[in-house]
Image (cartoon, rainbow, N blue to C red):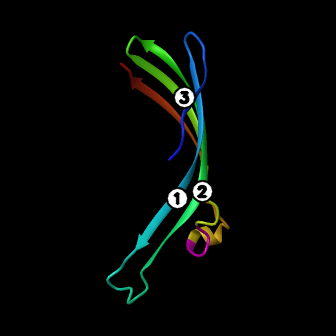
């Protein structure tokens, strides 16, 4: 979840940004586990921002950057423990095309 708000609107560009809190839930079930089924959840945060540019009267194009962090969500075993990776997050860059009314 999160909030989105317009930071500044120029004649042709719309800049926006937002932030939010995350909750990741998981469940592990196996017919062979004999009582070793696992479930739980982790909390984290997200921040994002971007810009939209009108292409036509009803179409926009945009770029958005996002960073999310979910600390201590992994790293107890397997490959994540070998590489000492504990954060289930990271950065992403999106290129978007949208239709507006």
Q: Is residue 85 above or below residue 76?
A: above
- How dense is the environment of label 2, judged by Cα within 10 Å: few (below 14), some, or many (20 and up)? some
Indicate yes or no whether the magenta region holds residue 95.
no
What are the residue bounds of the magenta stretch?
74-78
**In the picture, which quadrant includes the C terminus?**
top left
Where residue 71 sits, quadrant-wise, is: bottom right
Q: Cβ–Cβ below 8 Å for labels 2 and 3?
A: no
Q: Residue at x 52, y 58 (%)?
A: 23
Residue 27 in view here: yes
Membership of 77 in magenta stretch: yes
Compared across the picture, whether 54 is left or right of 43 comes to: left
Q: Residues within 10 Å of mark 1 (few under 14, many from 20)?
A: few
Give the Cα separation between the discs numbered 1 and 2: 6 Å
Q: Position of residue 10 (x, y in %)?
A: 60, 13
Q: Which residue is mark 3?
A: 63
Place residue 32 in its image quadrant: bottom left
**In the foreground, 101 or 12:** 101
Residue 9: image tag: none
Q: In this rendering, which labeled residue sits more in front, label 2 or label 3? A: 2
Q: Secondary structure at mark 3?
A: strand
Q: N-terminal of the two: label 2 or label 3?
A: 2
Which SS class for mark 1? strand
Tell me whether circle 1 and circle 2 mark residues in contact (CB < 8 Å): yes
Q: Which residue is mark 2?
A: 44
Give how far across and how far down residue 97 sits, in percent. 43, 25
- Image location of residue 55, percent across then percent down: 45, 14
The residue at which mark 1 appears reads as 23
Residue 68: image location, x then y, percent: 60, 49
Quick one: which residue is furthest to the bottom in this view?
34
């Amino acid at each position: 979840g999160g909030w989105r708000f317009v930071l500044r609107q120029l004649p042709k560009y719309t800049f926006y940004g937002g932030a939010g809190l995350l909750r990741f839930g998981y469940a592990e079930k196996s017919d062979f586990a004999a009582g070793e089924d696992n479930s739980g959840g982790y909390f984290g945060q997200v921040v994002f921002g971007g810009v939209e540019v009108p292409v036509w009267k009803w179409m926009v194009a945009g770029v958005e950057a996002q960073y999310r962090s979910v600390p201590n969500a992994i790293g107890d075993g397997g490959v994540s423990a070998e590489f000492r990776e504990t954060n289930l997050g990271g950065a992403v860059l999106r290129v978007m095309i949208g239709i507006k009314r």
